[in-house]
Image (spheres, rainbow, N blue to C red):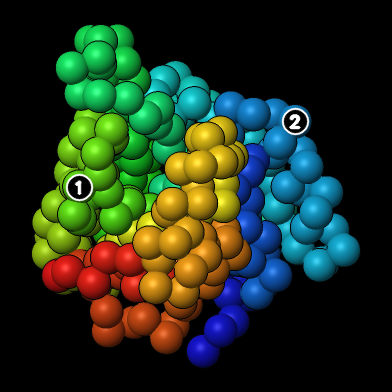
Amino acid sequence: MLNLAGKRAIVTGGASGIGRETALKLARWGAIVFSGDIDADGNAKTVELSKPLDGNIVAINLDITNEDSILSFAKTIGNSQDLGGEAIDIIVNVAGWDKIQPFLDATPDFMNKVLDINLKGPINIIRYFLPEMVERNSGKIINISSDAGRVGSMGETIYAGAKGGMIAFTKSLARETARHKINVNCVCPGPTNTPLLMAQPESMREKLAKAVPFRRIGEPEEIADAVLFFASDMSNYITGQVLSVSGGLTMAD
């Protein structure tokens, strides 16, 4: 059932786009949400948007590529006993970054940044909070990958590799943690109305929309709906799955 009352959730990348809509969606259904992002202003805006919905969102600075920042993020959450205790019930890894360019133009610094944000960062977040879930024999983990990681994407080769790695990581972790009643699933958005996509030329966005069977790009709240399903009790017997939310753009397995 769709009732997250009393659940404590982490959402990375909560300052905008899919992360913001996910934080708002989980809070709307009763979860206490800790929104982690390096964009303090955007994160604060997410908190403001939650107030008319009676949502409970706490904005915390977080750089998922920095171990000290992750430790500080966790410490802040741990000191929030007035918000339902210390345990984390739901982890949603949304934070991501990319820049469209040919593979041969990618510098070592660029490649490291893409891998750090889109693969290593989410893994480090889970590594920190997972032991607590194992100890309690419960938890929901939802990783936001991309259809680029399922079928590839021209101009996003490093990004696609990182997101493909996240898919494989999700499936492997699901196998390891099923004995602890922890669900680990993956949502793969197609072209979505996020700041990253809006930064691309309008001609490219129009071509993408025409390629989608529904003839439009997705909205962040539609991705958040899939996350809500995986975070809820409705998915209790589902783990290790990859759900494409792309308007039918990529129908391959």
Of callouts 2 and 1, the N-terminal one: 2
Is disc 2 surrounded by few (<14), some (14 to 19) or many (20+) residues within 10 Å? Answer: few
From what the image shows, is residue 96 above or below residue 19? Answer: above
Quarter-wise, where is residue 21 in the image? bottom right
Q: Amino acid at mark 2?
A: Asp
Q: Is residue 128 visible?
A: no
Name the residue at 39% across, 73% down: 213
Spot occupied by residue 51 in the image (x, y as percentages of width and height): 84, 58
The residue where tag 1 is placed is 152
SS at badge 1: loop
The quadrant in which the C terminus is found is: bottom left
Spot occupied by residue 77 in the image (x, y as percentages of width and height): 58, 42
Spot occupied by residue 9 in the image (x, y as percentages of width and height): 53, 57
Name the residue at 23% across, 10% down: 108
The residue where tag 2 is placed is 41
Front residue of 48 and 177: 48
